[in-house]
Amino acid sequence: MDSTKHTCLKLQTPQPIFIKGTWFPSHFHLSVTDGLNAWTCNASEEEVKERASNWDQPVSDYIHMSERYLGFQQPGSVYGFADAGSGFKRLSWTFEKEGTKLEWRWKFKPAENSMKVTAGILDFLMDANIRLSEEVVMKTKSNDKLKAEAEECLEQSERFQNEKAEFETKIYTKFLGVLNSKKAKLRELRDRVSSDHAKSHDDDDESSQKTETYDGDTEDEEDTSMHITSTSKGTSHGQKRK
C-alpha cells in the first residue's frame, strides 16, 4: 500500500512562495519556489529520527505535525523564509505546546535546476486544479441528481399522501354507510321484537280472560245440578206422603 502523500501550500511571507511536500512514513522531501528561484530540503530518515528524538516524539507524530503545518497554513502560526547565507534559506514555523511558543526550522539549499523545480510545482498545482475541477463537476452532477431525486421523492410523497387521504375518505364513507345500515336493521329488529312481545302479551291476556269465563260457567252448572237434585228429592218425599 502506497502511503506517500503530496501537499502544496501557498505561503504569504514578505514575498509569496509555494511549498511542495512529499511525505513518506519515515522521511519527507520539500521544495520551495518564489517563481524565479527554487530551493530544496530532503530530510533523511536519520535527520527526522534525530529531530523527533530531540522533541520526545515518535517519528510518525513528527512527520504528521510537519505535514499539518506545511500542507495547510495554520492560524496563529508565524511562518518565515529567511536567508541563511551562501544562497541557503531557512523555513520556520511556530506552534504552541502546553502554553509555550515553540519553533521548528529546516534549512534549504539552492536547487540544482530552479526551472525544473518550479515547473514541477506548477505542474502539480495544475494537475491538482484539474482534479479539483473534475471533482467539482462530478459533485455538481451528483448534487443535481440528488436534488432531482429528492424533488421526485417529494412529489411522490405528496401523491401518496393525497391518495391515502382519498382512500381514507372512501373507506370512512363506506364504513359510515354500512354502520348506518346496521343501525337501521338493529332498530327494525328491535321494533319487531317489541311488537312480537306486545302481541304475545295480548294473547296471554286474552287466554286468561277465556279461562275465567269457562270457570264461571262450570260453577253455574254445578249450582244448577245441585238445585235440580234438591228439587228431585223434594218431589220424591212429597209423593210418599200421599
Image (cartoon, rainbow, N blue to C red):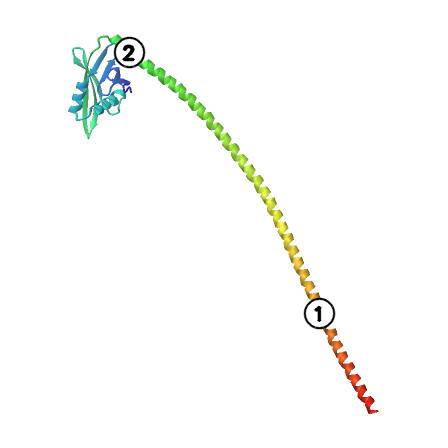
Circle 2 sits on which residue?
Answer: 120
Amino acid on which disc 2 is placed = Gly
Q: Is the C terminus in the top left, top right, bottom left or bottom right quadrant?
A: bottom right
Residue 117 lies left or right of residue 131; in this view the side is left
Q: Between residues 199 and 29, which one lies in front from this camera angle?
A: 199
Q: Residues within 10 Å of mark 1 (few under 14, many from 20)?
A: few
As measured in the structure, the alpha-carbon distance from the residue carrying label 1 to the one carrying label 2 is 131 Å
Q: Position of residue 4 (x, y in %)?
A: 27, 19
Element assignment for label 2 = helix
Q: Of circles 1 and 2, which is in front?
A: 1
Point 68% across, 60% down: residue: 199
Residue 223 lies left or right of residue 185; in this view the side is right
Q: Position of residue 145 (x, y in %)?
A: 45, 23
Farthest-out residue, bottom: 241
Circle 1 sits on which residue?
Answer: 211
What's the mark number on residue 164?
none
